Amino acid sequence: MKIKSQTAMILNMDKCIGCHTCSIPCKNVWTNRKGAEYMWFNNVECKPGIGYPKKWENQEIHRGGWHLKRGKLELKAGGRLHKGLNIFHNPDLPAIDEYYEPWSYDYERLISSPRRRHQPSIRPRSQLTGDHIKLRWGPNWEDDLAGLSETGSGDINFRRLEVSLFLQFRNVFMFYLPRLCEHCLNPACVASCPSGALYKRDEDGIVLVDQERCRGWRYCVSGCPYKKVYFNWKTGRAEKCIFCYPRTEAGLTTLCAHTCVGRIRYVGVFLYDADRIAAAASMISAAEVYPAHLDVLLDPNDGEVRKAAAADGISDNVMEAAVRSPVYRLAKLWRLALPLHPEYRTLPMVWYIPPLSPIRSHADQNRENDLIDRLRIPVTYLANLLTAGDEQPVRLALKRLSAVRQYMRTVRLDNKADTALMEEVGLTDDDAEQIYRLLALARYDERFVLPTATREHTGVYTDQGRCGFAESTG
Ligand code: SF4
Ligand code: SF4
């Protein structure tokens, strides 16, 4: 057992209102520069939809992440030989049009236009060429399902969905998916880099690009299945979400989490066993990766784990933060949060609580006895998004969320606790109160539990530049 700590985030999709407030401070602070105009380290997508860049989830097109080849874990885009042969032309790189051509407007025209009968109008101008452009695509082009009649069928999460539901999905459901780098335990971006410029920090698992070592080969861009590394055309180097490490080192949460209007984000520490990562990422069936990923995450209250963590140099304040961690309780203890596309085998560390939704009016009460089957957002769709198609973990999370709502209603309205409701979903009354508090009322210091960086970290870690585990495969 080799214990490490990881700063991670959980997002409650049930509460995201798609306001994009999270993206704005991130943009203003980290990518408000020449060459970075098209980059959104944090973006909010509308589901169903094909997202940003277009169809990023379809790895048959983008060839990001890992797959099993003859039982061995390999980068989907191929190893060193493939990169060597294609070093001056990476065939898997998304083109700028798949992100969008960034634009601004001639605001000056509004201010200095001479007096005339009609109000002055302004035209969009490309931030790359300076020319006027016709807008055809943007980072949230599909917002609130706009344009989905053209793009909706490209959403791969419709796999195995009933045809009738697929045909009328625009009338039936939608929700928002805020996205950022997953700071994966088995990051494909790190393994893809021929220059060794990407690395996962030992002290908190944040994945960074060393700007001095980056040579602009862009294999990290195509290797990341979440398409969360970007190429800066001005500096010729790769850039990505840094999980606001100057803030987290000071015990503050990330900008996206701090500013989130819906208070949907939770940031905290996981303790994990680095020796189990390779096995978890190599599970034969993609659906087995999520349960194996859960096994990698350790209980910070377990005496043996604490002893081993101390021996591995985990400091007391990190341990204390892991014990109070909201992310551990939501992901592992209560199984309410699930990873995004575990089938990419990168073991992502930004997880999601699936959204509940209204009951469908045309639901067949006789056939669909299970409440979860009558929700507007189909379980199959959520399972394709969060658990590689395995519906059981999604059902459990939705049932638990729904049971907590009903339980709290009985407590508030009938003045009695309906313990049976919680027993049915394998939780206690105390769990229900804690879940309700965390999801509905939690203050800043309950949602964000981060240790400050300690002096003893300096110089202790010598193997930066690797994946979350000790060997670099690629
Ligand atoms: S592979 Fe994982 S860690 Fe690397 S950029 Fe993509 S999401 Fe982030
Ligand atoms: S600020 Fe919060 S609620 Fe608004 S879009 Fe971002 S994640 Fe969703």
Image (cartoon, helix red, strand yellow):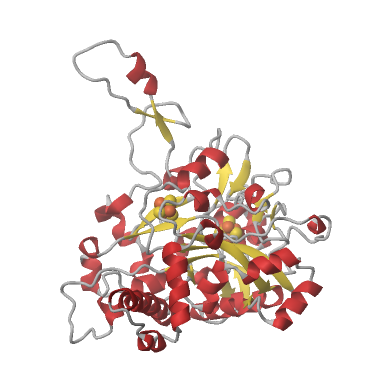
Residue ID at (49%, 50%): 42
Residue 146 location in percent, x, y?
Answer: 27, 50
121 or 426: nearer the eye? Answer: 426
**Quadrant of the image occupied by residue 271:** bottom right
Q: Is residue 14 visible?
A: yes
**Quadrant of the image occupied by residue 428:** bottom left
Q: Is residue 159 left or right of residue 386?
A: left
Residue furthest to the top: 114
Residue furthest to the right: 459
Residue 126 location in percent, x, y?
Answer: 42, 31
Residue 212 location in percent, x, y?
Answer: 73, 43
Residue ID at (47%, 79%): 431
Q: Quadrant of the N terminus?
A: bottom right
Residue furthest to the front: 415
Q: Is residue 259 left or right of residue 236?
A: left
Q: Quadrant of the C terminus?
A: bottom right
Residue ID at (41%, 46%): 139
Residue ID at (31%, 55%): 151
310 or 51: nearer the eye? Answer: 310
Q: Is residue 473 visible?
A: no
Is 428 rendered above or below residue 470?
Answer: below
Is 339 rendered above or below residue 257?
Answer: below
Residue 467 location in percent, x, y?
Answer: 69, 64
The number of numbered badges drawn on the structure is: 0
Q: Is residue 467 left or right of residue 164?
A: right
**Quadrant of the image occupied by residue 396:** bottom left
Q: Quadrant of ligand 1?
A: bottom right
